[in-house]
Image: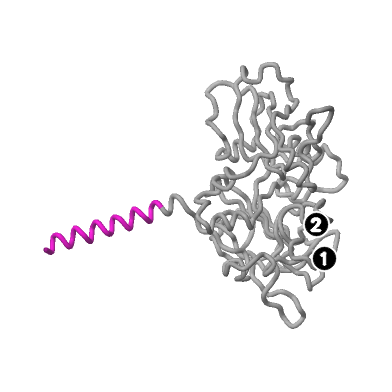
Amino acid sequence: MMRMRWRWWLAGTLGMWASAMVAAETSFKLVWPTPNPAWSEGKPPSAWLQHAGSGDPASGGFGGVRSGGTRFHEGIDIRPVARDRRGEPLDEVFAAMAGVVRHVSTSPGASSYGRYVVLEHPERRPAVYTLYAHLARVAPGIRSGVTVAAGQALGTMGHSSGGYMIPAARAHLHFEIGVAATRDFQAWYDARRFGSRNDHGMWNGMNLLGIDPVAFYNDWRAGRVREVSDFFARQETAVRLRLATFRIPDFVNRYPALLAKPMPFGPVGGWEVRFNWTGLPFSWTPLSVAEVAGLPAGQPQLIEVNAAIERRERSKSLAVARRGGWAVGKDLELVLQQLFGLK
């Protein structure tokens, strides 16, 4: 009887260990980035989004939520739950996932983000970034290269900003999840001749491509996202294109989880890339030289356009109707410049 009980105990222990190992391999810890409990309690976004001045909480959401749907917002704005006597927010801001600090900007006037922190999450596939902006202060010890745990305090919510003013009454955390278009952002920035210095390296907002954080969190809670790549795989194709080029973008090297098939042993002749409606390239298929035969080198060819999406989403222009066909829109053109170095 004792031997049988020991076997039951051993089997149960091994079973629990195996289940824990499976869970560790197929899921990850995700933390809401502020103390606001509304999302965790299943309340609607109107219970925790901070409006952008219109009074409509939806204007603090992701996507074409401002200026009648024509202005794009890359993240979400989460309002505070605690304030001091002066009306300043007291909420701490937390790391959404375990990661590494890649950028800290403590000068509020150097960016429209104000004070902000960027984390990269190398344990995830793909290794997405998260961004925490408009901070009142950055927590001690948070500096580039430091490893942080999920839920670790990064700073205090605020309303810092550069180039415009956010009143204390609308203080919030601007929160993003996404990928960076290119490691060589500075070359693209210099070629555009903006006339101002880039103080943020590749973590400049113009180089960042966000996903919808609320959709991501909701899918994770529902069990549809066991790894970040699951969310990317669920993206709807707005544009699919082919490009003949021998170039392998550093984007592919940094985010190999987005490859639709393995890289070939031989040379790459080009790429087939799927973009969602925001211009995020979520699926990459390497093409052989034979598969791009006849395509003009370095000139993107649109082979699929979801016309309904293009009509619906007015804050982004990926494709424009022209002479009975489709041409690359201004927002897609910008992303292609960064990804492939196109002029």
Residue holding disc 2: 66
Q: Residues within 10 Å of mark 1 (few under 14, many from 20)?
A: few
Q: Is residue 12 left or right of residue 84?
A: left
Residue 140 seen from this side: no
In percent of the image, x 79 and y 48: which residue is there? 315
Percent across and percent down for residue 76 are 70, 59
User: What amino acid type should be assigned to the residue bearing mark 1?
Assistant: Ser
Q: Is residue 297 left or right of residue 285?
A: right
Query: Are the residues flagged by discs 1 and 2 in contact, CB closer than 8 Å?
Result: yes
In percent of the image, x 55 and y 45: which residue is there? 229
Q: Is residue 324 above or below residue 12?
A: above
User: What amino acid type should be assigned to the residue bearing mark 2?
Assistant: Arg
Q: Is residue 338 above or below residue 108?
A: above
Nearest the viewer among 169 and 318 is: 318
Task: Please give the range of residues in magenta.
Answer: 1-22
Residue 12 is one of the magenta-drawn residues:
yes
Number of marks present in the image shown: 2
In percent of the image, x 54 and y 25: which residue is there? 264
Of the 4 image quadrants, the one containing the N terminus is bottom left
What element does badge 1 sit on?
loop
- Identify the mark at residue 209; answer none if there is no mark: none
Q: Residue 95 sits in which quadrant?
A: bottom right
Residue 229 is one of the magenta-drawn residues:
no
Of the 4 image quadrants, the one containing the C terminus is top right
Residue holding disc 1: 54
Q: Is residue 242 above or below residue 176?
A: above
What element does badge 2 sit on?
strand
In percent of the image, x 65 and y 25: which residue is there? 270
